[in-house]
Image (cartoon, helix red, strand yellow):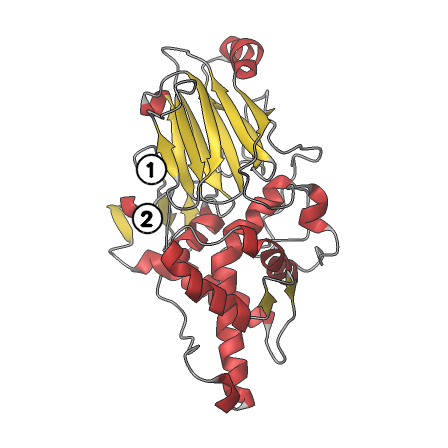
Amino acid sequence: MEYLSLSLSLTLACLGNAALTAIAQNATAEALVVSVKFCISARTCDNLRHACHWSVRDPYAKTFTNPLTNWTANLLHHNTALDDASNRLVALPNVDTLYSLAVLHLSAGEVVTTMPAWEGRFYVWPFYDLYANNVCNIGTITNSTAGKYLIKCHPSDPGCVSEPERGDYAGLIYLPMVYGLTLLRIEVGNTSDTTHVVCWIQPEFSLSPIPSHGNCGAPALTKALLADNLTVSNALLYTMQLLARFAEYNPPEVSADVPHIAATLKAAGISTSAKKYTQPAHVNLTQAYSDAQAVATAVKTIPADFVSLGGGWGTPAPALSGDLHSHYDMRAFIAIQGYLQLQASRAVSPSFASPSGTLYTN
């Protein structure tokens, strides 16, 4: 990411009020770029209808009309009907796919996934951190072995391990942080096939939490944690408050980014230790939001980041799809265009730019 100009190396005590305000303003915009997917993840978990109004076309468009209002973490919630354009729980759903969603938290231990063997049917079971980085995929798309997979919090080396040392599992899934999401996708055919999948296949996919002494030491992910004492009626304020509450337990996936992100959050008014956001004097959240959107949408003008497919279509470069690492600008762009994106080796995510410059994601 091309970081917004943020001169945190200067001694703050020697700066005037104008300079301090500029630093806080830029830091706030960068914090919004970093946190947009995190906020949308919270919206996926709960029906916070006035929060997270990120969208290039309409800042207030991202309101989920059919959320999981009674979700429980570490439990796979199966959608038993095919989706259409009216569905807002899954971004841009395929009409031939049944989805199953789960909110993951490893605060009390590990989680075991059970994946059945269904030859001749396409399915992919992706796992994301709370910033929606696609860190691991299992299923027929990766020719994965059926069986049980153990989900662990492993910040130093997130991803999939197909041949673990523990022989009682087909593989290990390492999340970079204590919280995450998973969105199982199962392809179906006609109506009778949909019924077959709902009755016989979906129930065989499951999640089971198991206690562990080596947990990541964070509070359980609940609806209360996502909303209590937060200003959910103000999208931008809520985003900053949410980031303050969760940042300590959800550091950047790339460890080298930790010092910079920590300094940015501090300059933006976020105390990770107190888990509190205090808006700096003279900082304009609306302007910071506009600046953050400009950073996100600018990626489509960078040839190395956004590859032209011809005819007005383009797609993020393969290395910038799914698991974004330090590319926070592309991560924000994908968040507001097509949430919970798969890695490029698993799917292509094209966007069409109209003559006016408006992007439409397929």
Q: Is residue 117 above or below residue 225?
A: above
**What residue appears at the point 61 percent right and 45 percent down from the top-left corner?**
43
* Residue 118 in which image quadrant: top left
Label 2 crowd bin: few (<14), some (14–19), many (20+), radius 10 Å? many
| Quadrant for the N terminus in the image | bottom left
Left-right relation of 358 to 215: left
In the rendered image, the residue lying farthest to the right is 229
Q: Nearer the viewer, residue 187 or 130?
A: 130
Disc 2 target residue:
320
Q: Is residue 57 above or below residue 208?
A: below
Label 1 crowd bin: few (<14), some (14–19), many (20+), radius 10 Å? some
How far apart are labels 2 and 1 at the CA level? 11 Å
Residue 312: which disc? none
Name which residue type carries label 2: Leu
Who comes first in sequence, dot 2 or dot 1?
2
Contact, mark 2 vs mark 1 (Cβ under 8 Å): no
Please state the horizontal and vertical placement of residue 294, each as a whole percent of the image.
44, 65
Q: Nearer the viewer, residue 58 or 122?
A: 122
Name which residue type carries label 1: Val
| Quadrant for the C terminus in the image | top left
Please state the horizontal and vertical placement of residue 72, each as a whole percent of the image.
66, 32
Q: Secondary structure at mark 1?
A: loop
Q: Is residue 318 visible?
A: yes
Please state the horizontal and vertical placement of residue 186, each as a whole percent of the image.
46, 21
Q: Nearer the viewer, residue 347 or 300?
A: 347
Disc 1 target residue:
348
